[in-house]
Amino acid sequence: MKISMLLLSSAAILVAGSAIAADLPAKKAAPAAAPSGACPAYGAGFIAIPGTDSCLAIGGYVRSDNKFTANVVRPAKSPYNLGYKFIARVDVRNNTEIGTVRSVIGLVAADGAIGTAAGNTVLTESAYVDVAGFRAGAAPSPVDFDNAYNNSGVSYQPTQVGLLSYTQAFGATSVTIGAQAAENNNDAGVTTATANTQASRPDLLIAATSKLSDAVTLKGGLVSHEVDGSVSGTAQGFAAIGRVDVSFAPVKVIFGGAYANGANSYVDNAGGSAVNGQFNSVMGGKVKDSASDASNLATASDYYGAVEYSLGSHLLYAYADSETGTQDTANYKRTDYGVGFKYQAAKGLYIRPELYQKIENANAASDTISNVFYLRIRRDF
């Protein structure tokens, strides 16, 4: 009897409790917590630095660059090169009374020479501070509209250059004005007792990027460069650089070009600065902006086009590039044609085989033709 009464009492309590619960407002599930130490305000990959109000992200890539040239003259040149490159960057940000302050430090090394440094040397790839639109330090040039399909890359500046700049957005257009370390400087890397080889001021520039629509993006830049003669005299050189990207999925078309009068390094088609650019081998070993007294400015031009076809995470592409340069009585012309496939094997990992033909002509001599198979394997992190 007592057991029956106990069961009936328990049932009554459960029913009453259920009725009361039904009248209470439903409790919402707790929001998913951010990963411990994350900094969502700055985007994915940033973590808080313990004991500070700063957030940090580490990124970069490691890359295998491999090339085989079918028709080189041996033993003067090797038909193959198995190479590498890596870049590692640290990005630190924090909020201040004048806005977000960003500091970036990057290191780079490769098997081949970078600028005047020998291969296998770790160098500064970037080291700059951003705040309220201002940038100061060593950073990619605002007029470097890099395409970088073929082995040398379609680029006008080194991966970093010392600069001071300010960027302001006007709707869909951003404009940058600045000063950067003078490129070229006539006989860069060479010091003699009589040569007047260093420009007395930095290069002045203005660059703009405008997104006209979801399909069309325009980029352009103008640079003023002081030309010093290798013996005496100065003159004013300039370079004009532009690029347009037109996208109508799954196709993207790119056109670009540059012209320089007394500022050839802004056209030189090399992954580094003019110190190791394509013009060197035919222009006395150095790209000069003028003759010895700066009265005869050198000229250069580069025009290229590319088309990309997206296959989801993979990419097919083809390109053509033509570059010319004239310095005193020396002249140079190079043309590249190439096709390639960028295959994404996994997130952040891609394999890029490419075939291209390089046609060079120095001082109206016979064309030198190189047929190249190029394989890049890159892991971004």
Image (cartoon, helix red, strand yellow):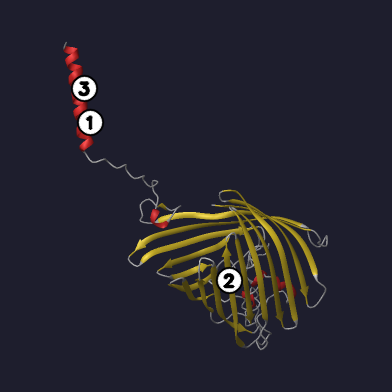
The three-letter code of the residue at mark 1 reads Ser
Instruction: Where is residue 221? Give x, y as percent.
Output: 55, 76
Of tags 1 and 2, the one toward the viewer is: 1
Instruction: Where is residue 372? Give x, y as percent.
Output: 75, 60
Label 1 and label 2: CA atoms lie apart by 67 Å
Q: Earlier in the sequence, mark 3 or mark 2?
A: 3
Q: Which mark is residue 18?
A: 1
* Residue 21 located left or right of residue 366: left
Of tags 3 and 2, the one toward the viewer is: 3
The three-letter code of the residue at mark 2 reads Val
Q: Residue furthest top?
A: 1
**Label 1 neighbour load within 10 Å: few <14, some 14-19, many 20+:** few
Residues 124 and 167: in front is 167
Q: Residue placed at 74% from the left, 76% from the top?
A: 332
* Residue 195 located left or right of residue 45: right
Q: Quick check: 107 above or below 177?
A: above
Q: Earlier in the sequence, mark 1 or mark 3?
A: 3
Residues 141 and 170: in front is 170
Label 1 and label 3: CA atoms lie apart by 11 Å
Residue 157: quarter of image: bottom right
Label 3 and label 2: CA atoms lie apart by 77 Å
The three-letter code of the residue at mark 3 reads Ala
Q: Which mark is residue 168?
A: none
Q: Which mark is residue 11?
A: 3
Q: Which residue is mark 2?
A: 244
Identify the secondary structure beneath mark 2: strand
Q: Earlier in the sequence, mark 1 or mark 2?
A: 1
Identify the secondary structure beneath mark 3: helix
Residue 253: quarter of image: bottom right
Instruction: Where is residue 61? Give x, y as percent.
Output: 57, 54
Instruction: Where is residue 170? Give x, y as percent.
Output: 43, 74
